[in-house]
Image (spheres, rainbow, N blue to C red):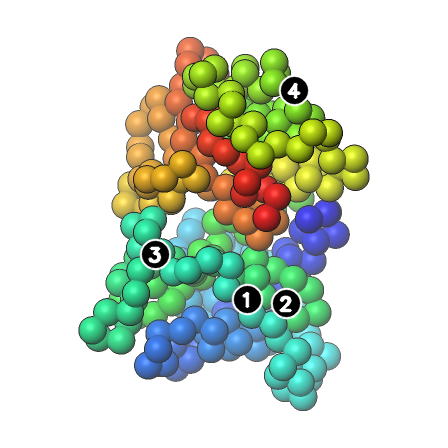
Amino acid sequence: MNRRFLLLLLLTVCATLPLAAQRGGRDDPSPVIRSYMTAMYSNDVATFNKLTLPHPLRSRLTSGGRVNEDALRQLKEDPGGLQIKQQRPFEFQGKETQLGANGQYPLGTTGHYVVSHRAPMVMGLVRQADGWKIDVRWWLAMTDLMSGKEPDKSSPEFAIKSLLMSMLQLNRRDAARYITDAKGMDLLFDGAPRQPEPSGVMEASVAEMPIVELEPGEFTPLPTGGVAEGVRTPDRKVLVGWFGPIELPFVIKRAGSEWKVEPQPYFALMEQ
């Protein structure tokens, strides 16, 4: 993912979809996503607020939006031009889940998609009592990145990105500064290439990666197995970053004034 991808992704965030689109027997978010695109191009801010998860900063995503008549025409004339790709199975509490007897996924089930129409975008959704809702937190984190805001050196985001940058440079000594246990170094570099990737694309993806902290009651699977739940404590956090379309989970702990990341085999995820 490069900066152009990030810009295009942000430009697609304007509004969302009618409630009626969510009445599918299979509880498939695809009709929701398709209706979202129509409403987005229509600059329907009121519907955006109905169908996204509440957030105190979400108006940042719709401010200054306008109707895109050309995109609306293209979507109507060529419905197949909208591509929707599910990136992973539906997950409930960090584990793959199935439809319930009522034909719906459990409340709190999450979905992760790449949607493309004129520009690509990554979309996270959460099953709520009144249907699928779009989670805007990663998009909001992207707006901070676009503004040029750098993570504070004492922040979890700084520790995470510094670790990944050290890994991509195959610098084990530097990476050791950012992990909780040096014994996990072999796990951290499991699957690492023999030489650093020369194009700089992966480093750019790390720099542009939006990271969101999970709340209690939110879960993410870990590459080594098991599931981590979000917490609200001063010395431990669980975060998820979007490395392009790939979700990277991080469990971090405070060590003095710094944050350290629990080692995970991140190369296996980043090289997908």
Helix, strand, or loop for circle 2?
strand
Identify the residue position indicated by label 3 in the image: 96
Helix, strand, or loop for circle 4?
loop
Identify the residue position indicated by label 2 in the image: 116
Q: Amino acid at mark 1?
A: Lys
Q: Amino acid at mark 3?
A: Glu
* Labelled disc at residue 85: 1
Residue 16: percent from left, percent from top: 50, 69
CA distance for labels 3 and 4: 35 Å
Residue 213: percent from left, percent from top: 42, 39
Name the residue at the left extreme. Answer: 101
Residue 253: percent from left, percent from top: 39, 22
Helix, strand, or loop for circle 1?
strand
Specify which label sits upstream in the sequence, 3 or 1.
Answer: 1
Seen from the viewer's position, the closer of residues 71 and 107 is 107
Q: Amino acid at mark 4?
A: Asn
Q: Amino acid at mark 2?
A: Ser
